[in-house]
Image (cartoon, helix red, strand yellow):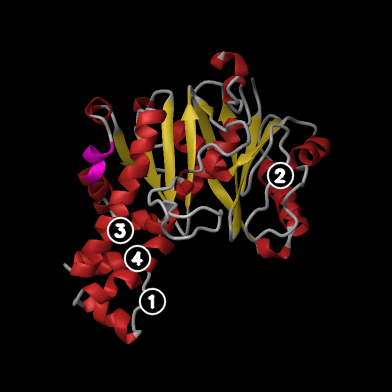
């Protein structure tokens, strides 16, 4: 199929857009650098939608061929028809917006709308490092302020019956643990996100006598996850304990994924990974406690390759091709 698709990734501070030329298989070409459009999502749904439309207009201007599809990665839950069915953090009025239909009516092309973490997972599967070795299955975990996730299974994004598949940050890793905004307690993101790591440092500080614990006691350290890992590189004992605690919880959640989804590759991204390979090394230390030996032998854990480009590239590629449909498992598979 000739022509190009447009990918849009709606982030907290900017909207990113890319064009994709390619076929329905894994071959393809992203056109130029991904474009960024700063925005204040807190201003509400209307300004965000206006920036999306401007981005599509501008990135498609002057491209050869014709636009054949649009893909959008958005915060919040999305139903099969591309409607927003859950509130999105920092975008008032976003829930209930018929985004897919609105874009289809304006540009007269098919539109694919999915959760942004799912589009990021698809981008890493399609274009990320050592893509071919990922086979048809990949799990992407983003460790940022919270923890997002996406699952690509049989070459398609796994969404689930209610759009909740891939909510890895809300796997309960400590029964009766820290309360989470989702309504549960003990969720992974309460311990292993940047926010969770900072909370752990404060809570664990009284049990240690180290430079970081003294800074926390004196109020001179926030702390932040970045400060914790900077202290870890200097041999700080509190930072080492916080890192081990975060790693253990991550390994526990990954164990659930390894036993249920059995992905060939787990990709880790997000701001916490700026600390380097020590994050993956910490997880690997604890994995034998939570993953069967046969599964562990085949489990590859890698850092994400695309950074903030993954969502836009994934959305652009996802928008075209028969094998890029969202994967809602048909009921007859279970009868």
Q: Residues within 10 Å of mark 1 (few under 14, many from 20)?
A: some
From the top left corner, tell me how far across and down residue 257 is, in percent. Answer: 39, 35
Please tell me whether the stretch drawn in magenta is mainly helix, strand or loop: helix
Whole-number angstrom distance, CA of label 3 to CA of label 2: 34 Å
Tell me which numbered mark, 3 or 2, is placed earlier along the sequence. 2
Whole-number angstrom distance, CA of label 3 to CA of label 4: 17 Å
Q: Which residue is mark 2?
A: 84
Q: Which residue is mark 4?
A: 200
Taking depth in this image into account, of 272 and 246 the one nearest to the observer is: 246
Residue in the image at 31% along x and 86% along y:
218
Labels 4 & 1 near each other (Cβ < 8 A): no
Instruction: Answer whether residue 287 is magenta in the image.
Output: yes
| Quarter residue 62 falls in | top right
Tell me which numbered mark, 1 or 3, is placed earlier along the sequence. 1
Q: Which residues are magenta?
A: 286-290
Q: Which residue is mark 3?
A: 275
Tell me which numbered mark, 2 or 4, is placed earlier along the sequence. 2
From the top left corner, tell me how far across and down residue 291 is, in percent. Answer: 28, 34
Labels 1 & 2 near each other (Cβ < 8 A): no
Taking depth in this image into account, of 73 and 244 the one nearest to the observer is: 244
Q: Is residue 141 positioned above or below 160 on the image?
A: below
């Amino acid at each position: 199929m000739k022509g190009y698709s447009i990918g849009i990734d709606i982030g907290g501070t900017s909207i990113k857009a890319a064009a994709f030329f390619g076929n329905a298989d894994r071959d393809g070409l992203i056109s130029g650098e991904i474009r960024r459009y700063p925005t204040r999502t807190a201003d509400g749904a209307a300004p965000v939608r206006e920036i999306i439309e401007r981005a599509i207009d501008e990135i498609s201007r002057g491209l050869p061929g014709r636009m054949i599809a649009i893909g959008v990665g958005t915060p919040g839950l999305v139903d099969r028809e591309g409607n927003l069915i859950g509130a999105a953090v920092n975008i008032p009025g976003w829930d209930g917006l018929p985004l897919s239909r609105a874009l289809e009516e304006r540009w007269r092309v098919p539109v694919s709308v999915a959760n942004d973490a799912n589009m990021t997972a698809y981008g890493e599967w399609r274009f990320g490092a050592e893509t071919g070795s990922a086979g048809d299955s990949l799990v992407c975990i983003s460790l940022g302020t919270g923890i997002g996730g996406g699952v690509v299974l049989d070459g398609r994004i796994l969404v689930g019956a209610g759009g909740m598949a891939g909510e890895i940050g809300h796997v309960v890793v400590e029964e009766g643990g820290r309360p989470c905004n989702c309504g549960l307690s003990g969720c992974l993101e309460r311990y292993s996100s940047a926010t969770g790591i900072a909370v752990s440092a404060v809570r664990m500080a009284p049990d240690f006598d180290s430079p970081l614990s003294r800074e926390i006691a004196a109020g001179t350290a926030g702390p932040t996850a970045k400060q914790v890992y900077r202290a870890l590189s200097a041999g700080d004992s509190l930072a080492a304990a916080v890192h081990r605690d975060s790693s253990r919880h991550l390994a526990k959640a990954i164990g659930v994924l390894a036993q249920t989804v059995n992905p060939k590759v787990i990709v880790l991204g997000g701001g916490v990974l700026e600390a380097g390979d020590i994050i993956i090394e910490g997880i690997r230390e604890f994995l034998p406690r939570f993953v069967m030996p046969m599964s562990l032998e085949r489990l590859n854990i890698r850092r994400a390759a695309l950074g903030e480009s993954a969502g836009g590239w994934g959305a652009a590629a996802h928008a075209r091709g028969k094998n890029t449909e969202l994967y809602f498992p048909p009921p007859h598979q279970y009868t």
